[in-house]
């Protein structure tokens, strides 16, 4: 009878050790799940900021395209004015000085518009590059968010399994205690 009691007491101690180990594992998994949730929140915040930045870049891109179109229209108008001035030079010798001044002004405006157009094209290219990068960053953040959610789900499943094992160990512990009391 004493051997049975000692064996049951030893078994009870083993179960209590197992129970403590399971509790520690649960705590570790809960900490890991909490950390995964924090990373998930951070990634969602980063994703929101990137999406906002992406929208801003798209708006800026649209504004630049409109400005480029307006400048191209100005260039066409300036080119047409230049042609008109050249025709007028042929017809009226006495207006030659005045027409040369107007031609020079039109050429300056055309060059200025062409320079500004080139600058805007460069800025548009840089903006489009930033937009492409931002879209790539959003895809990367979405991938990282999905992986984080998968890890969190796995950790939650493991915590649930450990809780089930803990409940089972508690039940076995209680049964052994009852058997000890009856012995």
Image (spheres, helix red, strand yellow):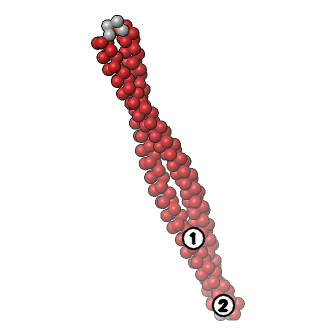
For disc 2, the marked residue is: 179
**Which of the 4 image quadrants contains residue 99?**
top left
Q: How far apart are marks 2 and 1 (CA)?
A: 30 Å
Where residue 107 appears, x then y in whole percent? 37, 18
Task: State the residue lying farthest toward the right.
Answer: 181
Disc 1 crowd, CA 10 A, few/some/many (<14, 14-19, 20+):
many
At x 43%, y 48%, the residue is 136
Task: State the residue lying farthest toward the top.
Answer: 94
Q: Which of 51 and 9 is in front in this view?
A: 51
Q: Where, quadrant-wise, is the C terminus in this rendering?
A: bottom right
At x 60%, y 69%, the residue is 26
Where residue 122 appears, x then y in whole percent? 40, 32
In the rendered view, tell whether residue 45 sits above or below residue 92.
Answer: below
Where residue 43 appears, x then y in whole percent? 54, 53
Residues at discs 2 and 1 in contact (Cβ within 8 Å): no
Question: Under tag 2, what secondary structure?
Answer: helix
Earlier along the polypeptide chain: callout 2 or callout 1? 1
**Which of the 4 image quadrants contains residue 75?**
top left
Q: Which of 67 and 161 is in front in this view?
A: 67
At x 57%, y 66%, the residue is 29
Q: Residue 159 carries which label?
A: 1
Q: Which of 33 and 81 is in front in this view?
A: 81
Judged left or right of residue 92, residue 153 is right
Where residue 18 appears, x then y in whole percent? 59, 75
In the rendered view, tell whether residue 103 sits above or below residue 132.
Answer: above
């Amino acid at each position: 009878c004493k051997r049975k009691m000692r064996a049951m007491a030893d078994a009870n101690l083993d179960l209590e050790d197992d129970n403590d180990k399971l509790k520690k594992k649960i705590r570790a998994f809960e900490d890991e799940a909490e950390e995964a949730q924090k990373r998930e929140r951070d990634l969602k915040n980063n994703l929101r900021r990137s999406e906002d930045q992406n929208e801003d870049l798209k708006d800026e891109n649209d504004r630049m395209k409109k400005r480029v179109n307006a400048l191209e229209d100005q260039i066409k108008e300036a080119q047409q004015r230049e042609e008109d001035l050249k025709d007028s030079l042929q017809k009226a010798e006495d207006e030659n000085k005045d027409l040369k001044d107007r031609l020079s002004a039109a050429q300056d405006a055309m060059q200025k518009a062409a320079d500004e157009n080139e600058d805007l094209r460069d800025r548009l290219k840089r903006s489009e590059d930033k937009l492409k990068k931002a879209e790539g960053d959003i895809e990367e953040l979405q991938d990282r968010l999905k992986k984080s959610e998968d890890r969190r789900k796995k950790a939650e499943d493991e915590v649930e399994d450990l809780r089930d094992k803990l409940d089972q160990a508690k039940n076995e512990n209680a049964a052994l205690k009852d058997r000890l009391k009856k012995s």
